[in-house]
Amino acid sequence: MVALWGCTTQDVEVISNAARFPAYPDALFSAIESTCTDPADTLLRPKRGILECRTFLSPEESAALIITYDGTPEKLPQLVMRFQAMKDNGGYLVDYQAFIDVPQKTGAPVRLSQHSPWVLRRMAQIFQLSGGEMVPPPAEA
C-alpha cells in the first residue's frame, strides 16, 4: 500500500480535495462511516463536522516507515483519511485530506502525503455522488 501511495514528506501541506454541499453532508459522512469497518480501522469524530478513518498498515509497511522516518514502535503509523465540513455561503464546504501519520520518538508526527491523480479523481466521484459540487483547487502563487 505504501508503494501505491507514492509518499513524500509533507509536514505542512497535505493533499486535499474539496466540494460544496447545499446542506450538511449527512449522506457522505454515513457512507464514510459504513466503509471504515475493517478490524484495522478506527473511526473518529473529534467534533461535529470532522470525521476520520484511521487504518493501521501491514507490519512490513509499518516497519519500513518507522525505520525510514525514525518513528517509534510504541505508536504505529496509520493511514488517515480526514473529512471536515465547514459552514460556507449557505451550504457546507467539505475538505478531504489523506496522509500517513508516522509518530516520532519525540516531537510531532511526520505526515506523508501522496499526490495520486487517481485518488483525487476517486474522491471527486464520491463527493459528486453524495450531492457535492467540486471546488477548484486554489491557484498557486
Image: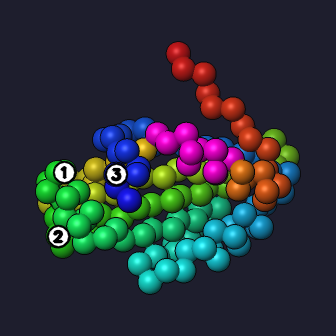
Which is more toward the observer, 44 or 126?
126
Quadrant in which residue 6 is drawn: top left
The three-letter code of the residue at mark 1 reads Tyr
Please provide the residue range marked out in magenta. Answer: 115-124
Please tell me whether mark 2 or mark 3 is closer to you in this view.
3
Q: Determine contact: label 1, label 2, CB under 8 Å.
A: no
The three-letter code of the residue at mark 2 reads Pro
Task: Name the image quarter holding the N terminus.
Answer: bottom left
Q: Which mark is residue 69?
A: 1
Residue that mark 3 sits on = 3
SS at mark 3 in the image: helix
Q: Is residue 117 left or right of residue 127?
A: left
Q: Is residue 60 above or below residue 127?
A: below
Residue for point 64% across, 68% down:
32
Q: Is residue 122 magenta?
A: yes
x then y, percent, for residue 75: 24, 70
The three-letter code of the residue at mark 3 reads Ala
Residue that mark 2 sits on = 73
Q: Residues within 10 Å of mark 3 (few under 14, many from 20)?
A: few
Q: Earlier in the sequence, mark 1 or mark 3?
A: 3
Q: Residues within 10 Å of mark 2 (few under 14, many from 20)?
A: some
Q: Earlier in the sequence, mark 2 or mark 3?
A: 3
